[in-house]
Image (cartoon, grey):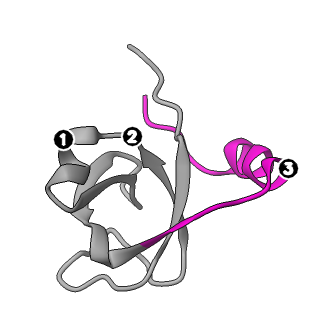
Amino acid sequence: MKTIRPTRYAVCLKNKNCEDLIVRKIYPVIHDEKAEKENHIRVIDESGEDYLYPASYFFVLELPQKVERALRRTLPVAV
């Protein structure tokens, strides 16, 4: 199996009808061009799997490299 590395991070702003999202938590984002064109974002949620959610549920963060490296070491990675 291929390991998927997050390319960005986003903070959850709302979780209406989504049991696997926690508001104010930072989630790894997986690049998905097709989903983004349809106003969705692919994140690794609380289940540990990557799923599509409405992009409006998140704010994508621009983080310093040092912070991104630290998050990569501590947040889950989809396999």
On screen, residue 38 versus residue 22, left or right, reads left
Q: Give me the residue at 35% from left, 85% from top.
A: 14
The residue type indicated by label 1 comes to Lys
Classify mark 2: helix, strand or loop: loop
Counting from the top left corner in percent of width and height, residue 26 is at 56, 67
Residue marked by disc 2: 31
On screen, residue 68 versus residue 57, left or right, reads right
Which quadrant holds the N terminus?
top left
Q: Distance from label 3 to label 1 (Cα)? A: 29 Å
Residue marked by disc 3: 66
Residue range corresponding to the magenta coloring: 59-79
Counting from the top left corner in percent of width and height, residue 16 is at 22, 86
Disc 1 crowd, CA 10 A, few/some/many (<14, 14-19, 20+): few
Which quadrant holds the C terminus?
top left
The relative height of residue 7 versus residue 63 in the rendered view (above or below) is above
The residue type indicated by label 2 comes to His
- What is the number of the mark on residue 7? none
- What is the number of the mark on residue 34? 1
Q: Determine contact: label 3, label 1, CB under 8 Å.
A: no
Disc nearest the viewer among 3 and 1:
1
Q: Earlier in the sequence, mark 3 or mark 2?
A: 2
In the rendered image, the residue lying farthest to the top is 1
Q: Determine contact: label 3, label 2, CB under 8 Å.
A: no
Disc 2 crowd, CA 10 A, few/some/many (<14, 14-19, 20+): some
